[in-house]
Image (cartoon, grey):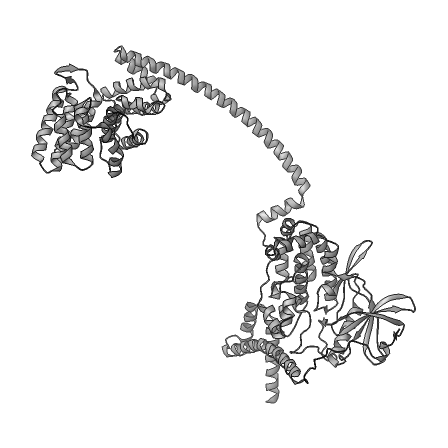
Amino acid sequence: MTTVTDSAREIDSAILEVALSLDDTATREEFLDRIYGKNEKGKAEIRQLIAASGDAAGFFLEAKEERMTLTVGLLPPGRQVQAPELALDDLLGVANARLGHYRLLSRIGEGGGGVVYEAEQEQPIRRRVAIKIVRSGMENKEAIARFEIERQALALMDHPNIAKVFEAGTTPSGRPYFVMELVAGEAITKYCDRNKLGTRQRLELFTHVCHAVQHAHQKGIIHRDLKPSNILVVGQDHGSVPKVIDFGIAKTTEGRRADRTVITAHDQFFGTPAYMSPEQIDMAGMDVDTRSDIYSLGVLLYELLTSSTPVDGQELSTFGISKIRQTLLDSEVVRPSEMLRLLPASKLLDLAERRDTDPAHLLGSVKGDLDWIVLKATEKNRVRRYQTANNLALDVMRFLEFQPVSARPRSRFYLLAKFVRRNRLAFAAGVVLTALLLGGFVTTATLYRREREALDEQSHLRKKADARANVARVALLLDQGLIDEADALRQEYPLSSIEPSLEAATVFRSLGDWNATHSRWDQATQCFRLLTQANRLSDPGRILNGTDIMATAAATLQEDEKDYLEFRKEMLDRYSLPRTSLQAEHLLKACLLRGGDSTLIAQLAPSVQVMGPLEQTPFLAWSALALGLYHLRAGDPGEAAKACNQGLKDQRIKNSCLASILAVRAMTTSARGDHEEARKDLAEASALMEKSKGGDFAEGKPIGPIWYDWAIAKLLLDEARELSGEPSER
């Protein structure tokens, strides 16, 4: 029974370990579905264990901080916690201390778990080397095991961008050390800034670092502490050479737990926080693989481009361990170009100068592809990161060669832009050739079009001249009474072929009158439209002094109310301030043949004032008609009837004017409800119109017919009949 229980626990432990190694939530759930099937209870228990793993990591970190705080609290007053002594043992503390064939010269730095000294090798060759020795107070099993891993890892690697290991040994006190290549360089970020390397040069150095990390990964070694101070650059005759150093916290990817000490504890974490991957700081998972170094490379690339890390390293140094963990797990990476854009102008200018460029070019070079590359390398979910350092280097090289990068979503426009940038010379030549061909084609087409336009213009001018000449002949024939000949000639040349002009106005008027007299309202309307356009070229006062407005209004409103309303609006816009009573009378009659709103009445009020008392106007009857229409449209039938009665007293009143006034008075009596009286006026007006048959009289003498006066009378009579309930004659 015990065996079964132990076996079940081992299975559960294995399932938990595999589940923790799966970063993607969907993939993890799919794995649990396959393992547990419909066993929802088992899945729920394993999910609780996964959640507890993360909580446990935080607990151990917080416990460690509390232990450190408690230790400080127990110290005697005035005493401080002392850092581990970095000096060597007594043998190495004396002048010219030696280790085998090496004479120690000076301490040049310290890394994960050890102190580095510069030394001189005397046999069998003379050269300067670096010796790394486990620091004092770190002789525990875990530290020594970690040192052993670094020694063996470096011994396995042979790459021009990784510091070489020459030999290893132990000091007389038993502390391990190894001898390695002395790299007389400086941190990659400082080197780039001091030499004002541009973005392209920085990226080329970065690709060498990626290749070195890839070599380590191929040897089964994960660095786990990639940062600028562990990547030194040496300036040589053939260029700048980066060297990756300090594999002091490296981890092997081979599982040799049986004969090796496992260097993992929940209350320890290794690396520099600003460059650590989420899974490295989370400590809930059971493994940290090569993709952790990819994240650190992404942070390094970020710093090479912006001189800062996604999370401020100085700020992190002020946090406790648990706060560091929470910050790194929850923070989002801001795009490098956005980081640069948000900088103060002075700081951005300084960064640009350190890259031998200006702010605009710096932002332009980083924005786009490099943003995408950095964001992919620093993905919190390692499944979505670059899977190898070579893949990261390859994307950077694609950027340098103007090729599409794999990190960026590909659109047709993006691919075309990269193709053009990559083949600039060929594309420029093609563009020039195409421009020349298009230019020649456009020039030829332009010349051809201009020739055609000139020919068309000549033809148009000829037709227009012919049309004007023939229209003038039509007008002459009309004046001579040769109606049939004039009509036949008119039909050959439509009025639309004649452009409005002051010279053509007389022709338009003559043709309009003749067509209106013969009830050809379509042709008359067209003539008076052209006449109105021609009148726009003349003085407004001249037009108001004549009867052209009245004629145009009467002819236009016969068939199309819309034409009349547009005409009325134009009259008000141009002639709303008449200068004489005659002008005011013409404007009132032209604008009030149909009803209007309060705005229209307000616009015409100045014309009523200009017209003055009726008895002082030159044509009393016509003025009375205009004033009666104004009061009728304004909604005052009493004042309208009063004006009409005063106009009927004019002894010189024409039959057409008399019929119009009777129609207006009939509308005023209908408005007051006296339809019987209205019918009497309508009967008188109708009889007068029938008797006159288009003719007119003045002071008892017959005069020639004026068609538009009777057209106005007919319009008003039809409106009056509708108000009184009688059928219209339309």
Q: Is residue 159 left or right of residue 458?
A: right
Q: Is residue 269 left or right of residue 544?
A: right
Q: Nearer the viewer, residue 209 or 581?
A: 581
Quarter of the image containing the N terminus?
bottom right
* Residue 90 rendering spot, x and y as whole percentages: 84, 80
The quadrant of the rendering that contains the C terminus is: top left
The extreme bottom residue here reads: 1
Query: Which quadrant holds residue 177?
Result: bottom right
Q: Nearer the viewer, residue 621 or 330?
A: 621
Q: Nearer the viewer, residue 405 or 360?
A: 360
Q: Is residue 330 visible?
A: yes
Q: Quadrant of residue 662?
A: top left
At a point 60% along the width and 66% down the height, the residue shown is 381
Would residue 536 appear left or right of 318 to someone viewing this image?
left
Q: Quadrant of residue 647?
A: top left
Q: Would residue 543 appear left or right of 400 to someone viewing this image?
A: left
Q: How many marks?
A: 0
716 is higher (above) or lower (below) than 20: above
Residue 130 image offset from top left, x and y in percent:
83, 68
Residue 730 visible in rendering? no
Residue 70 lies, in percent from the top left, at 64, 83
Q: Residue sitting at 71 percent across and 58 percent down?
A: 206
Residue in the picture at 22% in, 32% down: 594
Place of residue 588 in the rendered image (x, y in percent of width and height, measured from the top left): 23, 29
Q: Is residue 100 above or below residue 685?
A: below
